[in-house]
Amino acid sequence: MATVNAAIATGSEHLLGSLKVGLVADIAVFDGRTRSDYDAVIQADATGARLVLRGGEALYGEDAVMQGMGVSCEALDVCGESMAICAQSEVGRTYESLASLMSSAYPAFFCDSVPDDEPTCLPARSGEFTGEPSGEDGDGDGLNNDIDNCPTVFNPPRTMDDGAQPDLDSDGVGDACDESPIPDDLDGDGTVNGLDVCPFDDDDQTDTDGDGKGDVCDVCPTQFNPDSVCPPPLTTVQDVQQGSVSEGESVTIEGLVVTALSSNGFMVQDPDATDARFSGLYVFTSSAPTVKLNDLVVVSGEVEEYFEETEIVLSSVEIIGTATPIEPTPVTVADAALEDYEGVLIVLTDGSVTNAAYDCAVDGSSCKDTGLWEVGGSTGVVLYDKLYTDSDWDAQIGTLPAAGVMGFRFERRRLMPRDGEDFGG
């Protein structure tokens, strides 16, 4: 109960706190053959722990069990029982080596004897209590039964509690023996703890982002964060493209429209931008994207400069609706060749074909792209079929006006039409 309740209290019960498939846990398995339930743990001797796991990884246990799990660690005789311990793999030293380094310390376990000078388990405080029960003080905590709020449970007053026996809910029953020591309404706001979105803060139960934590106690009240960790701060495409956000920084951008798809990413653009410049961006997914054209999305990821082209390496995308398709922004060839329109959906308003079979090797010896053609000469743009979904690319070579999303590759600005409708106006 302590474990699961602690997980609930920290909002992490979907990750830990229970022995369930898919959750993470550190587990100790005790021998229940001669003792059951809690007794198997409380009264366990040196051989009582039969298996210890950290995050699902076996570290110590019965040798046969460890072997059966495919774990091969150092054999260890524990009071005649064949056990195994993974000291070498964990700390780089064998158990015997560690024991020899601490020869003056208590050994890790005792079999049939009690250590010399073993401290007493009997609590005592000079002049206050002896820890010995008596007729008037049944638990030996220094308070007579008639004034003790837990007369059968040891709970002496402590300085840290202002010299009183703790009673958080003020019901006359001390916390040490109270089956429910926490008040039903900790903050006194009229809402019981289990239903209170801020059980420790008096509030009006407002939860703007719907994550189960009220605005008063939510460190990011407008961003859904049920795991307590705030998502990356909201930013804009313009912030990313204009360098206000550093490379490697995690960001979240909301309200973007998907303008094009590739085999391992997609293009997005801010539909509310008053100026098309710096309003578009490429999102790298590493595999086929799950979004569709004109999806309205929230994108989270890490900013990266990939061979001088700004992109977001996707960590998550949320589809929040369908948007009106963004119309291409009319742009001259000279302007299209500027970084300002990287990632933006444009249509060329001027220019002519200067090379219908452009060889990109002049831009970089490793460039092997085919089917390229150039508009506006060496200071213009190169048309590229990376986003083209129709099968008639060769037939479209030389067709103007041309629309598409601007990109950057091998030191040239490239216009990437999406389908046949991006040609000929």
Image (spheres, rainbow, N blue to C red):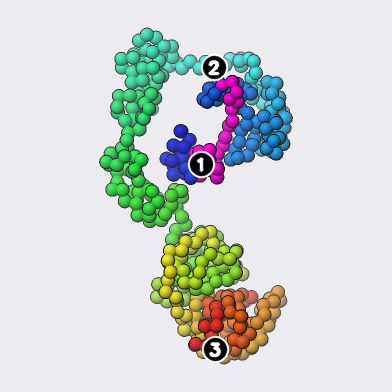
Look at mark 3 in the image and give the residue it sits on. 400
Look at mark 2 in the image and give the residue it sits on. 119
Look at mark 1 in the image and give the residue it sits on. 16
Residue 38 position (above or below residue 420): above
Give the residue drawn at x 35%, y 24%: 174
Disc nearest the viewer among 2 and 3: 3
Q: Quadrant of residue 130?
A: top left
Q: For numbered disc 1, what is the local secondary structure?
A: loop
Q: Quadrant of residue 35?
A: top right
Give the residue drawn at x 65%, y 31%: 61
- Measured as percent of width and height from the top left, residue 413 is found at 58, 78
Can residue 97 be spotted in the picture? no
Q: Main secondary structure of the magenta part?
A: loop
Give the residue drawn at x 60%, y 78%: 385
Q: Amino acid at mark 3?
A: Leu
Determine whether, in the image, residue 421 is placed left or right of residue 362: left
Q: Amino acid at mark 1?
A: Leu
Q: For numbered disc 3, what is the local secondary structure?
A: loop
Disc nearer the start of the sequence (1/3): 1
